[in-house]
Amino acid sequence: MKPILIGCGALAGLGVLSGVAIVAVIFYLGATAESKTTITLAGYSVDAPGKIADRSSKASVKSVGVLHRRTNSEFAISTKPVAIQGQDFELDQLIAMMKRQGAIVGQTRPVSRAGLDGLHLSLRQLNGLESEAELYKISDQEIMLLTYVSGNVKHDAGLGKLDRDPEKTKELDEPDAFFASLRKG
């Protein structure tokens, strides 16, 4: 009888130890950033944590998005023609129009990356979510937009069940690294 009790005690101990190990692994994986995915559009590339969520082309807008599953944040690179062939535009004109339409909700500041001069801004998207964005003129008729929507913003809008501390979300997402990763090729 004694060997059976010792065996049952050892099995129970291994079961508890296995349960603790599984919980520790889950907490560790939830606290680490996802691996980076490179997305490319119009000859430019960026790196974002997560997996490619969608590729779309609607009404001449092309977009590639990445979803960070641990934070529910979204990253995207998009291009859109804003002028017809032979017509030129300036970013200042586009920004003024976007402000009149209520799309820009914060201050803009100039940025230069990958040989492009653009603007970093806070943007209200068509679905009402606020995002960080960078806008670049990539040809006489076309713009490129890099966007980051925090999982906390999505959660507050009822679009997701993950709710993390905003600082932890930003630490895992690294939006500044996403914007800084813009490169030609």
Image: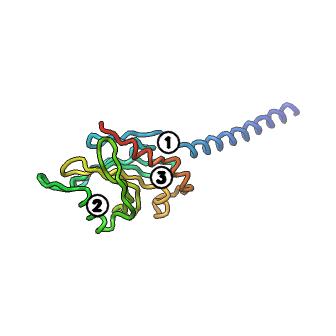
Q: Give the answer, above or below, for where 17 lies relative to 104.
A: above
Amino acid type of the residue tagged 1 in the rendering: Glu
Q: Taking 35 as reference, is 61 above or below it? A: below
Q: Is residue 27 above or below residue 162?
A: above
Q: Quadrant of the N terminus?
A: top right
> Looking at the rendering, in which quadrant would you find the C terminus?
top left
Instruction: Report which residue position mark 1 lands on.
Output: 34
Relative to 118, 162 lies left or right? right
On the image, numbered disc 2 is attached to which residue?
95
> Residue at coordinates 22% horizontally, 56% vertically from top-left?
90
Q: Nearer the viewer, residue 147 or 118?
A: 118
Distance between the Cα atoms at labels 2 and 1? 34 Å
> Which residue is identified by label 3?
72
Using a 10 Å C-alpha cutoff, classify the residue at mark 3 as few (fewer than 14 neighbours), some (14 to 19) or many (20 or more). many
Q: Could you say where residue 104 lies in the image, as x and y percent from the top left?
A: 35, 63
Q: In the drawing, does residue 12 fall left or right of residue 132?
A: right
Residue 137, image x, y percentages: 25, 50
Q: Would you say residue 54 is visible in this rendering?
A: no
Dot 1 alpha-carbon crowd within 10 angstroms: few under 14, some 14 to 19, many 20 or more: some
- Which amino acid is tagged 3? Asn
